[in-house]
Image (cartoon, grey):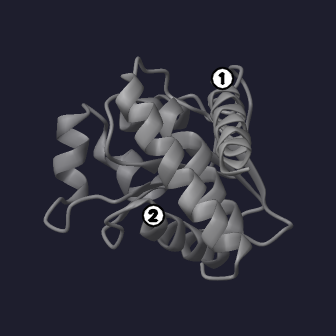
Amino acid sequence: MIGRIAGLLLILWAGGFVLFMMSLGQPLPPGEKTDAIVVLTGGPGRVDRGIKLMRGGAARRMLVSGVGRDVRPHELAAQYKVETRLFHCCIDLGHQAIDTRSNAEETAEWVRRHKFRSVRLVTTDWHMPRARLELAHLLDDQVELRGDPVKSSPRLVTLLGEYHKYLVRALAMLLGAA
């Protein structure tokens, strides 16, 4: 009996991992527009992708969530070779977030404050399922959330770790402990 239950749990876990891998997604096609772009810091290519989208007119405003408290707009503008006027008019730096959950909290507040109805979420592909889960949980149902993952080549240990974090957060939300 215990062997069957363990076997069933293993099959469910493996099937869930396959679904998780399929949910990593593809980058949005060029020309897709949203009201806002949100970039979660922490991985290569994320901020670059957001800036490229802003320069291309993909959104009116962008939030870079999880920026170090001592980082200023002109420093980021210099690092990414962006004209400071783009930062002054259209790019906000979020200094409150320290992890994915607080990224979602910071972002949801920013989206409400600006009354955005569509948001493009930019993060690394392996991080997208959990980031989307966290943000969708906090956003109004009327806000369209579009994932735009930055492609990467994660190691299996990274994928498994992220899958387990996703499972824990999904279960916590399901049980109302979020």
Q: Earlier in the sequence, mark 2 or mark 1?
A: 1
Image position, residue 65 (x, y; %): 40, 58
Give how far apart the Cα atoms at labels 2 and 1 are.
21 Å
Helix, strand or loop at mark 2? helix
Helix, strand or loop at mark 1? loop
Q: Is residue 138 visible?
A: no
Residue appearing at x 48%, y 53% in the figure: 165
Tag 2 near tag 1, CB within 8 Å = no
Whether residue 104 is situated above or below residue 118 in the rendered picture? below
- Please state the total of marks drawn on the protein image: 2
Q: Which residue is mark 2?
A: 103
Image position, residue 24 (x, y; %): 62, 31
Q: Which residue is mark 1?
A: 26
Q: Is residue 56 visible?
A: yes
Residue appearing at x 43%, y 50% in the figure: 40
Residue appearing at x 37%, y 57% in the figure: 88
Whether residue 20 is situated above or below residue 67 in the rendered picture? above
Judged left or right of residue 136, residue 165 is: left
Q: Nearer the viewer, residue 163 or 112?
A: 163
Which corner quadrant of the image does residue 135 belong to?
Answer: bottom right
Give, as a three-letter code, the residue at label 1. Answer: Gln
Q: Which mark is residue 9?
A: none
Q: Nearer the viewer, residue 149 or 110?
A: 149
